[in-house]
Image (cartoon, rainbow, N blue to C red):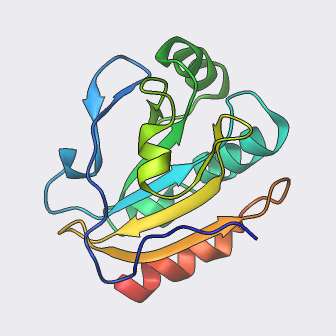
Amino acid sequence: MPGSTLELGRPAPDFELANQYGEPVGPSSSPGRLAVVVFYPFAFSGICTSELDELRDNLDIFTAQGAHLLAVSVDSKYTLRAFAETKGYPFDLLSDFWPHGAVAEAYGVFNTTRGMAERGSFVLDANGVLRASTVSPVGQPRQLDWYRKALDDLG
């Protein structure tokens, strides 16, 4: 089973990536807020789309805690913009396109064989400290209840 090398209770790597509009965004873009960093393999793919649809449809889980939702893939910002517009995603989709997968690698979820991020989710507190993480095996979606519990545990 895949897993991240990051340790709970330690600062998570900070980063800044272009969102679907080309704006630089990262965990520290919203000081004093929780950040939920969601890595997914590719825009428009089946499981990834269903996971992000579920996050969109349950956005209140994140907004109730004041969390900044950051969805990260190795797709270009142009692909991410088309994806966000097609699916109506109101949260930031971040492009880890170049250097290819560098942020996913920093979080320990870059699959070098397949050139993509694994399905890893990370909850960072307002100081950028990792408070919860999960990584799902290839082909297995993350459960929405994991996000709810991880955020409730911080509240």
Name the spot of residue 39 as percent of width and height, x first.
Answer: 56, 49
From the viewer's perspective, is 129 left or right of 58? left
74 or 71: nearer the viewer? 74
Tell me if I can see residue 133 in this picture: yes
Name the spot of residue 83 as percent of width and height, x first.
Answer: 63, 22
Query: Residue at 54% of width from left, 67% of height from top?
Result: 4
- Seen from this angle, which residue lies furthest left? 31
Q: Is residue 8 above or below residue 99?
A: below
Tell me if I can see residue 91 in this picture: no
Q: Quadrant of the N terminus?
A: bottom right
- Seen from this angle, which residue lies furthest front? 113
From the viewer's perspective, is 93 left or right of 15? right
Q: Quadrant of the C terminus?
A: bottom left
Q: Is residue 54 above or below residue 43?
A: below
Query: Residue at 58% of width from left, 24% of height from top?
Result: 75
From the viewer's perspective, is 136 left or right of 110? right
Name the spot of residue 136 as percent of width and height, x first.
Answer: 72, 64
User: How many numbered circles are shown?
Assistant: 0
Name the spot of residue 153 as percent of width and height, x first.
Answer: 43, 88
Residue 73 placement: quadrant: top right
Query: Residue at 66% of width from left, 28% of height from top?
Result: 87
Query: Residue at 28% of width from left, 22% of height from top?
Result: 23
12 or 91: nearer the viewer? 12
From the viewer's perspective, is 32 left or right of 116? left
